[in-house]
Image: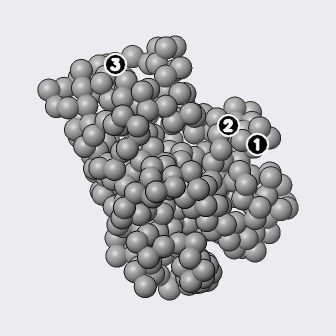
Amino acid sequence: MSFAGPFLLDASIDSDSVADPSKRAFLSKITALFAVAACGGLAPPAGEAAQRRYPTVAQPSAMNALTASIDNHIKYLRLSGRIAANERTAWLVYDFTSRQYLTAINAGIPYQSASMIKPFIALAFFYKVLEGRLHYTPYHRMRMEAMIQYSDNSATNYFIRLLNQTSRRTGPAEAERTLKRYHPGIFRHTRIVERIPSGGRSYRNKASALDYHRFLYALWYNQLPFSNELKRLMNLPNRDRVYTGADGVARQTWVFDKTGTTARLCGDMGILVAQGRNGGRYPYTFIGIIEKTRSTRNYRAWKNDRGDVIREVSGIAYQHLRRMHNLV
């Protein structure tokens, strides 16, 4: 199965080396949104699927405004001590309406995935269902919700064991092989090599911000099996880092996301669907990652503070899009 989507050179800008229920009305709202898409408002560019390639939609010069805002904010946080010298970050924002990357900072570098790998595990499982090797039962649905909504590690390992049953490979290896078999263009930097260890200390699975974005792009345009189910799962109420507590993001925004957290990684990747003053909807992807080289000594304080950093950058991105599209 091929994938057609936006392309960005892996040499993206490197500047880092120096549960609100109102937003979760998924089932009714998304139906209306895709009705708009069917009329051409959110459809992929004509001919992309036929071309079977990744059209170049933006170069770094097109990203200067938002990139400069984020870069300046991160530099300020480094000077003030909120981001340490042994921490690196990655940021990516893609606007579906203008079909361009608004920023891509360290986007092609693999970072630890933590729980952000879990939608990838879900996708690998759904491909096995599509192949007839596994079945999506009500029990599986319950465990899938636990994995995505509550980031349950035992549920994640359950699905990895199911993948193991379909192959002589280990479960993690079969998950990666399945993803790259169907979508080599999406999961270019993805490495799945371990189950979630005891205590959640998962440091070896990796992916880049671009991988997350390409996955989200394909998900939004229903280019993945069980796309609507994946959207439903990622839209379930949770304490995300792109909307919940992000003062700069309007309350009318819908969110489809997955967070990831360890003592070395704090991140979130998702699709935000903003509301315009004209009543229209304006979707965009937002990926924010902060990674430490060594485990923090104060996990809770570090997780909370770096989560707030991601919320701040999410607010900066929303305000940029607000000016572009006259959002609420």
Q: Secondary structure at mark 2?
A: loop
Residue 239 locus on image (x, y percent): 65, 44
Q: Is residue 150 above or below residue 264?
A: above
Mark 1, other Cα within 10 Å: few <14 / some 14–19 / many ≥20: some
- The amino acid marked with disc number 2 is Pro
- Mark 2 vs 1, N-terminal side: 1
- Mark 2 vs 3, N-terminal side: 3
Judged by depth in the image, the label closer to the viewer, 2 or 3, is 2
Q: Secondary structure at mark 3?
A: loop
In this view of the protein, which residue sits in the foreground, 314 or 4?
A: 314
Q: Is residue 115 left or right of residue 184?
A: right
The quarter of the rendered structure image containing the C terminus is bottom right
Residue 146 locus on image (x, y percent): 53, 27
- State which quadrant residue 319 falls in: bottom right
Q: Residue furthest front?
A: 297
**Do labels 2 and 1 touch, CB within 8 Å?**
yes
Q: CA distance from mark 2 to mark 1?
A: 7 Å
Residue ID for mark 3: 134
Residue ID for mark 2: 237
- The amino acid marked with disc number 3 is Leu
Give the numbered dot on residue 135.
Answer: none
Give the numbered dot on residue 20.
Answer: 1
Residue 142 locus on image (x, y percent): 53, 20
- Give the residue at x 50% y 45%: 219
- Give the residue at x 30% y 56%: 188
Q: Secondary structure at mark 1?
A: loop
Residue 247 locus on image (x, y percent): 77, 61
